[in-house]
Each structure stands twice: as structure tokens, then as C-alpha cells.
Amino acid sequence: MNVDELFEGIRKRDLRSVSRSISIFEDDLQSSKADELMKRIYPITGRAHIIGITGPPGVGKSTLMGRLSKRMKETGKDPALVAIDASSPFSRGSFLGNRIRMQDSLRENGIFMRSLSNRGFKGGLSLSALGAVKVLDASGFDPIIIETVGSGQSDLDIISIADTTAVILAPGLGDEIQAIKAGIMEIGDIFVVNKIDREGAFLAMKDIQDTLSLGKSGNWIKPVIGTNSLTGEGLDELINEIDQHKKFLGNGSGRDTRPTSELYLLLENRIRKLIESYVSDDESTADIVSLVRSRKIDPYEASEAIIRKSFGHVGKN
Amino acid sequence: MSGGEYLADGKNQSLFKDKPIKILLAKPGIDGHDRGMFVLARAFRDAGMDVLYAGLLPTPEDVVDTAVNEDVDVIALSLLNGAHLTVFKKVMDLINKRKIDDIAVVGGGTIPDQDKPKLEKMGITGNYGPGTPLKVIIDHITERATEARSRKNRN
Ligand code: B12
Ligand SMILES: Nc1nc2c(ncn2[C@@H]2O[C@H](COP(=O)(O)OP(=O)(O)O)[C@@H](O)[C@H]2O)c(=O)[nH]1
Ligand SMILES: [Mg+2]
């Protein structure tokens, strides 16, 4: 499919076009097509409310997302989902397991969901997620819900593309919760303690509430909600808080910082890629590396040397 | 060899440019023999693929919907319950009806030799059974995926 066909398909919500377009944003070999497509769709985006779901592995993010989207659909919303799985550090492959947890909810309600591999992208958020969100936005889905990899603090990039970020926790995280709280309390707009059927849920909620009350409180008071994703308990409350937060942003009380933060995310990535393209496919880089291997130079010197030979002209006039 | 491989013994994934092969594993029928699925899922991931599993008891419709929404290159159908001729055919019929020609379909499980030509004729290749070396399976899938991908990327 060429860009014209894809664009038409996106507007008509032909799911093959939608999903093929997302693939194009996943494939670096098609980056010129991706650029062209983004140019077409960007003007018609910005309508969807983007919800980020983040939190440590195993707390029930995928299960919750499935249930949440089902409930939203029942109440007349038109959600689409994106979930990011971590790729194996040893092969570039991945097991895209989030889908299995929500398969039943998706199936019953015909909800569009797309799995993405983070392909080693450090921020926990696949860059292609940004493309996926734009494609779904352009085809009129609202809201769009994204699940991050779930590696706790490294998921912070989610705020770059989400309007509302929900941090999911669960009872029984133990001491881990202290570490998590350090980074994650700031990024959440809404806090969820999932698995309230488990022991310690009430304490976990109270603990989070206490921590939040210590922090700087802006105009938005961050709610803490208990949910059970197996039964659906608490989900209406969560939907209500998401709606409230959306209203809050719409009032102009929250600034619309998303376009800027998205831009920085992209810039950072493009610069990284640019550096990689300079550094790779180069015999002299290999020579420098072998010097480090044989301990003739140290890694600090080596990185300096690689930078100098690749970017020597940059900034030197 | 790329600089990435020099720098980190080939483990710097961010330097891989192309999108990995994406494959959906599915048992579209009443078949609880899932051990083989996990063996294959793992082998495919370790071979560098993005692997999806359709979960328990997906209908042929579920399988095709998931394959389209996830934009996979390959659907790997597996049955050990003997119903492959009817069930695999249902999946193929849906694919043909939706005019999908850029997703390859491969099969496997307990498939008697005499059924293999029938499946091949439907466009389902491989049809490997117990004891097939994983390398044979992976090579076949890579070949079929490459065809599918080039059809996806045509204009
Ligand atoms: C272990 C086993 C079970 C376990 C399953 C445990 C589990 N969670 O998986 C249990 C005990 C539960 C079980 C139950 C039954 N089983 Co049973 N079971 C087996 C057995 C001995 C081994 C299967 C296995 O796990 N193999 C190991 C895995 C790794 O191999 P695999 O699944 O074959 O997959 C490999 C290849 O086939 C190939 N492959 C598979 N799929 C695909 C797909 C693609 C695309 C590709 C490329 C390759 C590929 O690659 C895989 C990796 O190498 C087989 C006999 C046999 N030798 O195959 C019988 C067998 C499959 N079972 C059989 C039967 C009849 C049953 C029951 C109906 C028995 C009963 N009356 O209750 C139930 C049904 C359960 C159900 N709900 O479906 C029959 C099926 C006969 C048929 N085809 O008509 C078999 C063949 C035994 C026999 N000779 O009668 N079973
Ligand atoms: N008891 C209980 N278990 C849950 C709940 N939500 C999810 N789970 C289970 O928690 C496990 C991890 O869920 P998953 O959605 O994969 O978590 P994720 O890693 O955060 O996406 C699964 O076994 C779920 O069935 C809940 O509310 N209560
Ligand atoms: Mg998950």
C-alpha cells in the first residue's frame, strides 16, 4: 500500500491500513515512508485523549487495560490500545505477552489492540509507540491507551506522549514500593492499587496517599483508586477520574505540554540514531575497539577517539 | 559487520534497523496440547522474532483478526487433535475472503503424511510434526516470512 492508500484507509478506519501504517513506524528501513505518512496524518491528530498505563511488572496492567477498555466501550467510548513488551536482551526477538491477558475482553468487544516490541529502547517506551498513537488518533479512536514495558522508573518517557498517566501498583510489592515511589509519584496523575482482593491493599492505598500528600500539590489532586481487574470492581471510578483529569486539562488549568515533550523525545532519538550511523559500519571504529580489547588504550580514550573521528568537524568551525 | 557488533558483540539491539519477523502462534480449535507452543514461542524469540500467542481456544475469526491488527508476517497454526484439515481450512478461507496475500500461513502438529499435500494445496506449508529439528522449522518460517514481508512492502 502506498502512502495515499494508507492515509485513505486510516481515515476510513480500515484496520489493515491502520495496522500496516503502525508497522511502517516500527521499521527503520521504511523511515522515509514513515516521514511522509506522519506529514499526512499529523494535521488530523490531537483529538484523542491519550492515557498512559505504567507500573511494575505483574501488577495487572494488561488485565486492567483489557477490562477498562471493555467498560469504556460499554459506556459509549471508542478506545484503542497499544501495549509494549520488552525485547530479549540476547536476541532482538520478543514474546509479546500482554495481549494474552486482555484477549478475552478484546475479542468480546471487537477492540483494536496492537503489541509493540521496545527493541531495546531504553526509555521503556518504544519510539514506534508514538507513531502508533498518531495513526490511531488520526483514525478517530478516543481514548488511546498505552501500556508501558513496566520497568518502573525507566518508564518515565510515557509522560512525553500521554495526557493522563495512571500508575498501577499492587499490594505485596514490599520494599520495592519505596524504590518505585521515588521516581513514579511525580509522573502519575492517577494512582491505582490493583488486586484489592489481595491482603494489604488498604495499607498500600494509604501508604500512597500519605506519600502523595507530602509532595507538592498543584491544582490537580491526585486520586488513589482501588481496583480488581478480574471482576471489574473500581473501574467506573477509574474512568470517572480519567474523565475528570481530561476536563481539568481542557479547562486550561493544565498546560498542553505534550507537543513539546513529544518533539524532545523525537529529537533525542534522531540524534541518537545519527550518532549510531556515524559510529557504525566503519573500519576505523573496529580498529579502536580492538585497541581497547588488547588493553592498548582505555575505554575513555577510545570513546573520545571515536567521537573525535566521527564528529571532529562538529563545533570546531 | 556493523559497528554495533564490534562495540558490543552484536548485542546492541538498538542498531538493528529492520523490523523483526512477527509471528502469531495459534491453536484454533479444542486442543489443550500447549507444550509445543511454548517450545516454539521460545525458539522463535531466540531466533530474533516477535512472537504472539493467540491464547486458549481462539476461533478462526479471532486468529485472522489478531493477525491483521498485529500485522504479522506469519500465522503458525498448530493442532494435535486431528482436526487440522477442517480447522486450518477455515482460517485459510477467511484469509482468502479478506483478500489477504501478504501473511504466510504455516502448519504443524500431528499431521499424517497423506494430509500434507492437501494442506499445501490450500497454501499452508511446513506441516511439521514431532521430532522436527527446530532449525528446519525456523528456516522454513524465515523463508515464508521474507516472501510475505516483501509483498507487504510493495507499493
Ligand atoms: C503430552 C501429551 C498430552 C498432555 C498435554 C500437556 C500439555 N499441556 O501440552 C496431556 C496429558 C494433557 C494430553 C491430553 C490429551 N491427549 Co495428548 N499427547 C501428549 C503427547 C504424548 C506429547 C505431546 C507433546 O507435548 N509433545 C512435545 C511438544 C514439544 O511437541 P509437539 O506439541 O508435537 O510440537 C512440536 C512439533 O509437533 C512441531 N509443531 C507443533 N505445532 C506446530 C505448528 C507449526 C506451524 C510448526 C511449523 C511446527 C509445529 O513443533 C513442535 C516443537 O518441536 C502426544 C503424543 C506425541 N508423541 O505427540 C499425545 C497426543 C497428542 N495426545 C492425544 C490425545 C488423544 C489426547 C487426549 C484427547 C487424551 C484423552 N483421551 O484424554 C487429551 C486431550 C487434551 C486436550 N484438552 O486437548 C493423541 C492425539 C491423537 C490425534 N491426533 O488424533 C496423541 C497424538 C497421542 C496418541 N498417539 O494417541 N496429552
Ligand atoms: N488477584 C488478582 N489478580 C490479578 C488482578 N489483576 C491482574 N491479576 C493477575 O496478575 C497477573 C499479572 O497480570 P498482568 O496483567 O500480566 O500484569 P502486568 O505485567 O502488569 O501487565 C496475572 O496472573 C493476572 O491474572 C486483580 O485485580 N486481582
Ligand atoms: Mg503487561
Image (tube, coloured by chain):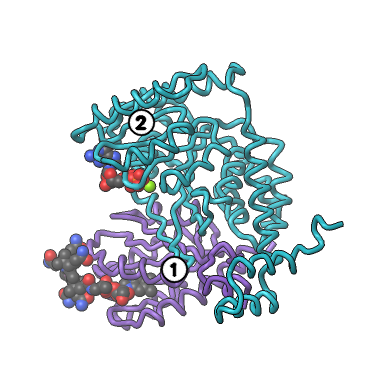
Chain colours: A cyan, B purple
| Residue A80 locus on image (x, y percent) | 49, 39
Compared across the picture, whether A17 is left or right of A215 comes to: right
* Residue for point 24% across, 68% down: B81
Compared across the picture, whether A49 is left or right of A178 comes to: right
Three-letter amino acid code at the position of disc 2: Val
* Residue for point 59% across, 70% down: B4
Judging depth in this view, the residue of A167 and A68 nearest the camera is: A167
Residue matched to label 2: A192
Compared across the picture, whether A255 is left or right of A218 comes to: right
Quarter holding the N terminus of chain A?
bottom right
Q: Does mark 2's beta carbon lie closer than 8 Å to ligand 2?
A: no
- Work out whether B89 lies above or below A53: below
Quarter holding the C terminus of chain A?
bottom right
What chain does mark 2 sit on? Answer: A
Say what secondary structure mark 2 lies in: strand
Judging depth in this view, the residue of A219 and B112 nearest the camera is: A219
What chain does mark 1 sit on? Answer: A
Residue matched to label 1: A90
Q: Is residue A105 visible in this depiction of the protein?
A: no
Sequence-earlier tag: 1 or 2? 1
